[in-house]
Amino acid sequence: MPSAVVATQSWLDDQRQDVRFVTRTTDNLQAALPQCRIVGVGGSQTLNLGQQRIVVETFAADELAAITLAHDVNDLLLFQMRGVVGDAVISKVRCDSLPARHDYTNPAVFMQVAMYTVFLRPSY
């Protein structure tokens, strides 16, 4: 089964060249802003075959930039991410939790977090 994290990260990376989309944050996050981290959610959040839940964490140097980027990514995922993406076919994306402010350990970095369910299947 293809990974929703990998598919989402690579697709978003193609859509927005002005933002770094990663699966792990860099050591010096403040120097690499703006940045979005895509993380898979498992455990009790594991869904049916063909559905994978992801969390998108958006980091920026000021609060307005973080909010704007988080909502831009939200719109991209909900309204444009469809079709073949790498080894996956994305049929739909559902927003389970809208972008919301979360405190980050470094007060100079502003963070927004949202949760999505990606409906996908292998492309073969």
Image (cartoon, rainbow, N blue to C red):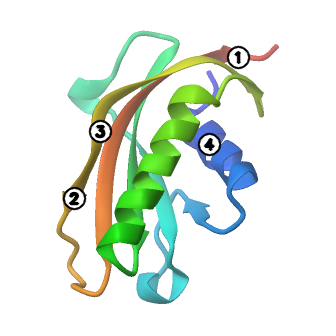
The residue tagged 3 is 98
Q: Which mark is residue 29?
A: none
Placement of 52 over or under 104, stated as above or below: above
Dot label at residue 122:
1
The residue positioned farthest toward the right in the image shown? 124
Q: CA distance from mark 4 to mark 1?
A: 13 Å
For the N terminus, the image quarter is top right
* Kind of residue indicated by mark 2: Arg
Which label lies toward us, 2 or 4? 2
Frontmost residue, 34 versus 79: 79
- Nearer-N-terminus badge (4/3): 4
Asked whether the residues under the numbered discs 4 and 3 touch, taking CB atoms below 8 Å apart as contact, a structural biologist would say no
Q: CA distance from mark 2 to mark 4?
A: 24 Å
- Give the mark nearer the N terminus: 2 vs 1: 2
Q: Are marks 2 and 4 in contact (CB under 8 Å)?
A: no
Task: Identify residue for label 2.
Answer: 101
Quarter of the figure with residue 108? bottom left
Left or right for 69, reference 83: left
